[in-house]
Image: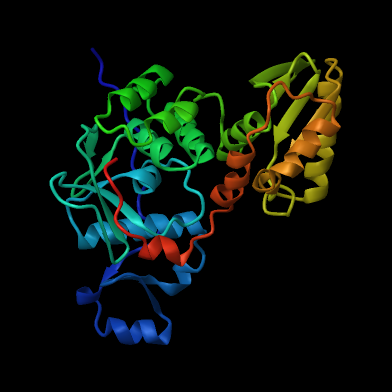
Amino acid sequence: MPAILRPTPVACPVPLLRARDVPRAARAAARGDLVSVVRGVYAPTSLWRLLPPWLRYLTRIHATVLQHPGLVLSHESAAAIWGMPVLGDPVIVHALGDPTRTSRLHAGLRIHTTTGARDVVDLGGFAAVSPSDCAVDLARARHAVVGLIAADAALRLDAAASVESLVEQNEQRPSSRGRRVARWALGRARAEAESTLESASRAIIELLGYEEPELQVEWRHRSTADRTDFWWPAAGIAGEADGDLKYDGRFGDPVSLLRARRERDHRLRTHGIRSVLHWGWSDLVDPDALDGILRGAGLHRVATPDPYRLATARVALDARPSSARLHGRGETAV
């Protein structure tokens, strides 16, 4: 039987320097040449400043592993190492510890206790739980939207993962904490969701009470093939999770990009699509905005909205690190 290929761990995006290997490291940091990533590990300030929040978090994970060899990364830290989506900079590095000891947080490293078996992958000097186990951990411990983002990513990245296996892993965990909450995300996982924005959109759309759309439907017009992120056939409505940054100049001339989008929308309408909707991340952080887009196009609810999870989704998707994450108390078993 052929071996199942696992995703490749993501390398540190900048060079890391131990304090003991850099003459007068503290002075270099005081001058602004180096930045302290974790205690005793530095990175060049010029490179650190260029990193987006999620890559700063990845750098912090690699720096922590340098100081604490043998860690078994979990939760957002395992997600970052596997290239799964991480929202912003979660700040805290997560790892599994001895189940006979108490969970604890010290100097930015949270050790979780667990009595459940995990599929642990040795990465040489440290290890990480598999993408599937990582998705189950996040679905149990984080907001439903974050859980669905992780579960979708696990299916995309790990050939060994399936919806059935994710659900089974959750049900077989000895601890019942988070089991019921995780069922919502794990049972809805779809590999067809191709990005964090699409996964988060799927979650908010359902929490708003709208029908689950078809994903990645292909439409051919002469020699051109277009795919819609979301498609509601009964309503004749297509949806596109475009992102807020696509038209700010980072990906080419905004005028040309917008013209190409209009041409694509026109091709889609030749197939009888009544409306092509577009939204970005800011419309998910404010679910009322996405609700207005969908409702304004004539899409009708099929279920009652979930006001609590919609309200808390604003915080989960905003993804700005807070000091509370650095100073929280130990967690219970996962």
Q: How is the image coloured?
A: rainbow
Left or right: residue 196 versus residue 280 is left
Q: Measured along the vertical axis of the image, is residue 103 above or below residue 30?
A: above
Residue 161 visible in the displayed image: no
Q: Residue at x 13, y 46 (%)?
A: 100
On the image, the x and y values in percent for residue 16 come to 31, 65
**Name of the residue lying farthest toward the left:** 100
Q: Measured along the vertical axis of the image, is residue 144 above or below residue 61?
A: above
Q: Measured along the vertical axis of the image, is residue 184 above or below residue 55?
A: above
Q: How many marks?
A: 0
Left or right: residue 64 versus residue 314 is left
Residue 276 visible in the displayed image: yes
Q: Residue at x 18, y 50 (%)?
A: 125
Q: Residue at x 37, y 81 (%)?
A: 29
- The quadrant holding residue 67 is bottom left
On the image, the x and y values in percent for residue 305 come to 67, 32
On the image, the x and y values in percent for residue 187 come to 47, 22
- The quadrant holding residue 1 is top left
Q: Nearer the viewer, residue 113 or 45?
A: 113
Q: Residue at x 73, y 17 (%)?
A: 219
On the image, the x and y values in percent for residue 197 come to 60, 39
Left or right: residue 276 versus residue 250 is right
- The quadrant holding residue 63 is bottom left
Instruction: Name the image quarter holding the C terminus.
Output: top left
